[in-house]
Amino acid sequence: MKEFKYLSPESVEDAISLYGQHSETSKFVAGGTDVIVKLKEGWMEPDFLISLKKIKELSDLHKNEATKELSIGALVTHATLEKSLMIQNRYPIIYDAVSNIGSLQVRNVGTIGGNLINAVPSADGAVPMIALDGVALLHGPDGERSVEVKDLFIKPYVTVLKPGEILKKITIPPQEANTGSAYIKFGRRAAMELPLIGIGVLLTLDTDQKTCTKARIVLGVAAPTPMRAFEAEKSLVGQKINEEILVKAGQIAADESKVRDSVRGKAWHRKEMIKVHVRRMGLKCLDIIKKQS
């Protein structure tokens, strides 16, 4: 592994300034669970690692009681989200996803921001942030800008971040009443591994608790980047949700997916799992809504 200098700024502005000084010879690092592996295997060889760990604002997790928006700092760890009662009770899709990332040791240091910025198709953390209509706040040499999380990814390992930009936080808008959300990571075995497919579903029902007013179906490992199944979502809105309707939505989502064969799984199998788990996660959403009433 190539030697490098380790820099620890205490503000976003200082981190961006350091990047500007060292340009393409530097790399930002958060929890380091991905970066360190890449360093050891020679996939990247920076002269400077700029750690974001001392920037306190990036580790903030709170819900604004006035606006009801949830703010998740980029350095909030998976373990922090997993242990949060607020997340467990109000944002179960986030809990479902982060509680299945890696091992306990990885979740203790790995961050939600790093999970997003690494931009792998199998990133568990991306699915709930897209399903919840999350918005990423980016800060760089030209100031701040906001990007919807669904638009954050260009292709595997590539995001819309410009050189020197940092992901500061993800903002989740207020959750409507009668909303349920759920995520499943489907793999070949019940142990630490990347998902063969990841499926997140969010449903909001009208006051009758039957008619769907909002639907999100988000797929991971179903395309080069995490994707929303827009046509499947449309098939649910305005419908009285039941198992039959969810089965149809699962078929539409499977047809929308861009799954492919790989050494880890066949495309046809992934499509079947999308069909099965859209239905299952939809039913789980209905159960969550029922328990809220």
Image (cartoon, grey):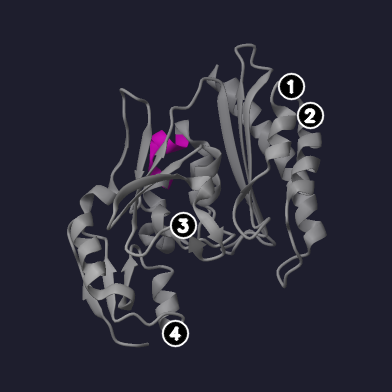
* Residue labelled with disc 3: 160
Q: Position of residue 42 (x, y in %)?
A: 44, 84
Question: What range of the chain is rendered magenta?
Answer: 82-88
Could you tell me how far apart the alpha carbons at marks 4 and 3 are, in whole angstroms? Answer: 24 Å
Q: Is residue 286 left or right of residue 88?
A: right
Nearest the viewer among 69 and 141 is 141
If you read the primary sequence from the N terminus, does the residue marked by circle 3 or circle 1 appear first?
Answer: 3
Q: Quadrant of the C terminus?
A: top right
Q: Amino acid at mark 2?
A: Ile
Q: Is residue 210 above or below residue 3?
A: above
The residue mark sitting in front, 4 or 3, is 3
Residue at image mark 1: 239
**Mark 4 and mark 2: Cα distance apart in space:** 49 Å
Residue 204 located within the stretch drawn in magenta: no
Q: Amino acid at mark 1?
A: Gln
Label 1: few (<14), some (14–19) or many (≥20) C-alpha neighbours in 10 Å: some
Of the image marks 2 and 1, the number of the one nearer the N terminus: 1
Residue occupying image coordinates x 17% and y 59%: 10
Quarter of the image with the N terminus is: bottom left
The residue tagged 4 is: 42
Q: Is residue 92 left or right of residue 107?
A: right
The residue that mark 2 highlights is: 245
Q: Are marks 2 and 1 in contact (CB under 8 Å)?
A: yes
**Residue furthest toward the top?**
208
Residue 283: x %, y % from top left: 69, 32
